[in-house]
Image: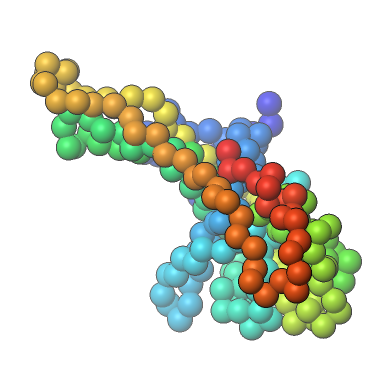
Amino acid sequence: MAEFQKTAFNKINRSPNRATYNKDEVYEILDSHFICHASYVYQGTAISIPTGYGRHGDTIYLHGALKNRMLLSLLDADKVSLSVTHLDGLVMARSVFHHSFNYRSAIVFGKARLIEDREEKNEALKVITENIIPGRWDEARQPNDNELKITAVVAIDIEEASAKIRTGPPSDDAEDYDLDIWAGVLPLQVIPGKPVSDEALKKPLPISNSALDFSWD
């Protein structure tokens, strides 16, 4: 079972019983989401920005404008971090103090590098697109030379990572279990709605399979 080595960056100190360093578990959390938060420092201020991503192997890809402040800051850093969180439920305890969340979260660390090769850049954009909505890359027009030229694509080779997961019911103080207060878990999930066709379509077209087949597990 392949695991990430524990380091000062990825080691989970609070509630370590919820930690995992297993690569498969970390990557499952990454692959079942498509929005991460990228952290960077700009003019001495720490900033966290949500952005789309895709993973292939041990590499995560981000993209944006050539002069995107976040991407440029990531490229200047010796080490960068990205985090992803799934919110699975509200844990409602008998006491306010013990309320919590059921969640799956992952954080990865690595060195960012700029992708300049045209084919590699195009493939990275495909990875990002397919991570967001599988099947869409082959349905839509793919990037032309000018679009590739004005787009920056950054690869982050994952060197360290860990995940933290909470599941199950509330954990109350022993004496609180005698209280007549409802306690339990309120599950949460994202459910896709019915696709809405663009009013600018020149003629009625069947809804794309990628939209019809989309699910967020």
Q: Residue at x 55, y 48 (%)?
A: 192
Q: Position of residue 140 (x, y in %)?
A: 79, 64
| 78 lies above or below 22 | below
Residue 75 in sight in this render: no
Q: Depth check: 152 or 108 in front?
A: 152
Picture coordinates of residue 202 (x, y %)?
A: 75, 74
Q: Position of residue 153 (x, y in %)?
A: 72, 69
On-image quarter of the N terminus: top right
**Is residue 92 positioned above or below 131 on the image?**
above
In the displayed structure image, the side of residue 19 where residue 29 appears, left or right: right
Please say if 210 is above or below 27: below
Query: Is residue 133 positioned above or below 112 on the image?
Result: above
Q: Nearer the viewer, residue 97 or 134?
A: 134
Residue drawn at point x = 69 percent, y = 31 percent: 2
Question: Residue furthest toward the front?
Answer: 204
Count how many numbered circles sit on residues in the image: 0
